[in-house]
């Protein structure tokens, strides 16, 4: 019973292209009491994997939060799969404004403590006592009310590229940070103002509206279905869009255009721009806004240091980033010191000529690291063809040369990295053998997962 991905993102992208099917990107959420989130998670994975669903889904005892894509042909079968559960019957599915067949390349269903990290203790207030839902037309009307305060419940890197006119946009990295800040800023208006909130798909406002009502706000409203549903209604009903710019999304697209307005600037030169990118240096991966001009000059990098690093040999790049954790850096967009526009600096300042690279500070650092590393001499043997997760066994096709019991092997891949071990026993064409040669299929136990793109080498003296 397969409950996890066995393909890499690269392999999945090729499969999607070869299939030639149009895919839909959509999102939904539901608060419900789920007694066994792990069992629920496994049921979803089994049902959705067979429907070619890909995406990022969180489940918890309080419900489900899902962003995913699937072949358009499987849409109604997918609806049937979720309406098996009473709490998801008739649920609104927010279809993305812009479609991209590669918006998601893996199916990830995770069990979490909460479906949104809000930092709240739900037992201390009534989470079902939520604000009034408004459709697009009602939302537009309330925006024009002078007694309305409209608040963007998203993070700074989301609201920077697009937002509703007149909205308060808290400068926060996470949803949980915004709640006490908003309460403090608006504490004098709990009775005399209407608190109007919005987010991407509605899930953050659902919890925030109950929290603010608990804190004494008397007139609390929220945009039904968030920006995604608002945009659909605006187009369907011919309404004026009060949202300007782009809607940030948490998938490969990083944003979908709502209006032609560009409300943000390149973080390197200050030119009008609302296109997010991730620094191409794998040891950095900073999320930031970069115009086409800076993209060309900076080679898709965020800083002079990263430009220097990407021109080093791959082994030296790996040595630099070994042990460095940049997981939270993606949220620091617009706040990193290396983004030169806010510092009024030339983005190319400090980028050395490639001929001078050997003398650079980074190159010297690399040389120090590599002194301790011994170059591994290896001989290509073949490639991974399957991984059996329960017994943790890898299968390989031998394409060149041979391997035998007692050999030291190296398995290398983009996700796997470099893993070295000694073969103690193996099956060759389903039989226990001492040696495998070109054309054979062999399997042996591994203490790690392999991918289909992984290469198998024999370490030689």
Image: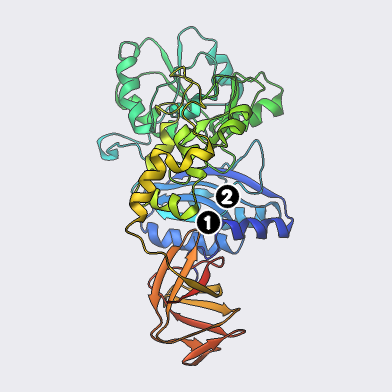
Tell me if mark 1 has few (under 14), some (14-19) or many (20+) residues whose alpha carbon lies within 10 angstroms of its own: many
Q: Nearer the viewer, residue 58 or 352?
A: 352
> Disc 1 marks which residue?
107
Q: Residue furthest right?
A: 20
Q: Which residue is mark 2?
A: 104
Label 2's element?
loop
Q: Label 2 neighbourhood size at 10 Å, few (<14), some (14-19), many (20+)?
A: many
Whether residues under marks 2 and 1 lie with C-beta atoms below 8 angstroms apart, the answer is yes
Q: Is residue 60 visible?
A: no
Q: Quadrant of the C terminus?
A: bottom left
Relative to 72, residue 281 above or below: above
Residue at x 67% of width, y 56% of height:
16
439 and 26: which one is in front?
439
- Which residue is depicted at the point 53% across and 67% down? 454
Say left or right for 449 vs 117.
right
Q: Is residue 63 above or below residue 185?
A: below
Q: Is residue 245 left or right of residue 324?
A: right
**Residue 32's x, y, as percent?**
41, 47
Residue 294 spot, x, y in % from top left? 58, 28
2 in relation to 161, above or below: below
Name the residue at the left extreme. Answer: 124
In space, the residues marked 2 and 1 are separated at their CA atoms by: 8 Å
The answer, for residue 98, to whether it is visible in the render is: yes
| The quadrant where residue 243 appears | top right
Picture disc at residue 229: none
Picture coordinates of residue 441 (x, y %)?
57, 83
Judged from the image, the secondary structure of the residue bearing numbered disc 1 is: strand
Using the rendered view, name the quadrant where residue 31 is placed.
top left
Which sits in the foreground, 210 or 251? 251
Where is residue 350 shown, x and y percent of the image? Answer: 46, 29
């Amino acid at each position: 019973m397969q409950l996890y991905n066995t393909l890499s993102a690269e392999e999945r992208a090729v499969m999607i292209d070869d299939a030639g099917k149009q895919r839909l990107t959509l999102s939904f959420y539901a608060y419900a009491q789920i007694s066994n989130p792990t069992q629920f998670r496994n049921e979803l994975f089994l049902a959705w994997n067979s429907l070619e669903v890909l995406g990022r889904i969180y489940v918890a005892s309080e419900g489900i939060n899902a962003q995913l894509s699937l072949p358009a042909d499987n849409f109604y079968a997918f609806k049937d799969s979720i309406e098996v559960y009473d709490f998801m019957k008739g649920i609104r599915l927010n279809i993305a404004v812009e479609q991209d067949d590669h918006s998601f390349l893996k199916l990830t269903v995770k069990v979490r403590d909460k479906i949104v990290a809000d930092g709240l203790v739900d037992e201390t207030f009534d989470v079902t006592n939520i604000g009034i839902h408004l459709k697009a037309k009602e939302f537009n009307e309330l925006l024009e009310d002078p007694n309305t305060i409209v608040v963007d419940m998203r993070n700074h890197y989301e609201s920077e590229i697009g937002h509703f006119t007149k909205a308060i946009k808290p400068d926060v990295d996470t949803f949980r940070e915004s709640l006490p800040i908003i309460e403090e800023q608006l504490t004098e208006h709990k009775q005399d103002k209407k608190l109007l909130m919005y987010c991407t798909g509605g899930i953050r406002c659902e919890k925030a509206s109950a929290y603010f009502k608990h804190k004494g706000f008397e007139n609390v409203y929220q945009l039904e279905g968030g920006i995604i549903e608002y945009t659909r209604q605006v187009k369907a009903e011919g309404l004026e869009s009060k949202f300007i710019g782009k809607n940030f999304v948490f998938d490969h697209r990083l944003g979908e255009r709502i209006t032609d307005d560009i409300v943000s600037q390149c973080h390197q030169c200050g030119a009008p721009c609302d296109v997010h990118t991730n620094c191409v240096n794998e040891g950095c991966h900073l999320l930031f806004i970069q115009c086409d001009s800076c993209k060309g000059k900076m080679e898709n990098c965020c800083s002079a240091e990263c430009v220097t690093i990407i021109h080093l040999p791959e082994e030296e790049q790996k040595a630099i980033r070994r042990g460095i954790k940049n997981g939270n850096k993606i949220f620091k967009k617009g706040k990193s010191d290396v983004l030169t526009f806010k510092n009024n600096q030339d983005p190319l300042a400090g980028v050395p000529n490639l001929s001078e690279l050997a003398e650079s500070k980074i190159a010297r650092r690399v040389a120090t690291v590599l002194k301790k590393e011994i170059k591994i001499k290896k001989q290509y043997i073949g490639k991974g063809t399957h991984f059996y997760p329960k017994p943790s066994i890898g299968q390989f096709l031998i394409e060149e040369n041979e391997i035998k019991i007692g050999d030291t092997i190296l398995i290398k891949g983009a996700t796997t990295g470099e893993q070295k071990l000694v073969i103690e026993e193996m099956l060759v064409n389903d039989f226990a053998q001492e040696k495998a040669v070109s054309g054979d299929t062999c399997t042996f136990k591994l203490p790690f997962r392999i991918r289909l793109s992984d290469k198998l080498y024999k370490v030689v003296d």
